[in-house]
Image (cartoon, rainbow, N blue to C red):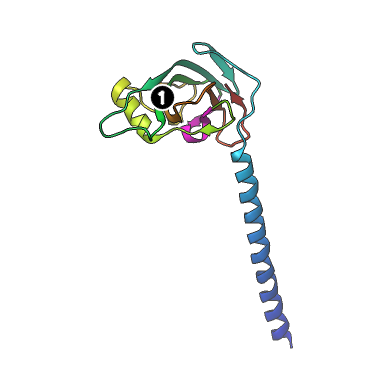
Amino acid sequence: MMDQWTIRVAKSPWRHTKHRLAGVVFTALVLTSAACARPPQTAHLFAVGQTATTDGWRVTVHSFVPLPAEEWRQPAQGHVFCAVELTLENTSGSIRYVMPEKQMLLVDQDGQTHAPYHDAAVTAARVRQWLLPQGELGIGGKTHGATAYQVPTDTQDLRWVFRTGLLPWAKTTT
């Protein structure tokens, strides 16, 4: 009798735990998707050439320029490549990480976000010798480069948004 009871208890929690775990994972994915889908909200607006200091970062956008199409790398029909030249400095007391695909977005007049685009980044590197700032940045470290994007040609009122952290709800500067 004791062996049957032990077997039942052993099977029952596993079966329920699997369903609970699946529910938790599904809920986390839905919440993460919803958080990532929202355009970043910000109250801090800076012009090209100004330096923003926020949450352990000093960020300066030096220019926003269109990039020419190349023979091997061309924007999609009705789109253009563009680049945001910037300098990032880690003013925090710890090592920071830079991931442009999570921290640097362009937002248009409709709230549509545009993530960095690989082919545009290659063009920026070839044409302007700007590399993508990414990876580890030590205490007091500074990096200069550009993030590049592909946006529709009729896009207006673009704002470049920098998230101070890697998560969607991190502080933002525009």
Q: Residue at horizontal 69%, vertical 70%?
A: 13
Is 100 inside the magenta-drawn segment? yes
Query: Which residue occupies the extreme bottom position in the image?
Result: 1
Which residue, given by chain and number where applicable, does mark 1 sit on? 82
Q: Quadrant of residue 4?
A: bottom right
Q: Quadrant of residue 73?
A: top left
- The quarter of the picture where the N terminus appears is bottom right
- The quarter of the picture where the C terminus appears is top right
Q: Residue at horizontal 67%, vertical 80%?
A: 7
Looking at the picture, tell me which residue is in the foreground, 154 or 148.
154
Tell me where residue 102 appears, x and y as whole percent.
51, 35
Magenta extent: 93-107
Tell me where residue 44 appears, x and y as whole percent.
63, 19
Tell me where residue 126 appears, x and y as whole percent.
29, 25
In this rendering, the answer to whether 44 lies above or below 102 is: above
Looking at the picture, tell me which residue is in the foreground, 70 or 139.
70
Q: Residue at horizontal 36%, vertical 32%?
A: 75
In this rendering, the answer to whether 47 lies above or below 103 is: above
Residue 118 in view (yes/no) = yes
Give the total number of marks visible in the rendering. 1
Asked which secondary structure carries label 1, the reply is: strand
Tell me where residue 173 appears, x and y as whole percent.
58, 22
- Give the residue type at disc 1: Cys
Is 69 inside the magenta-drawn segment? no
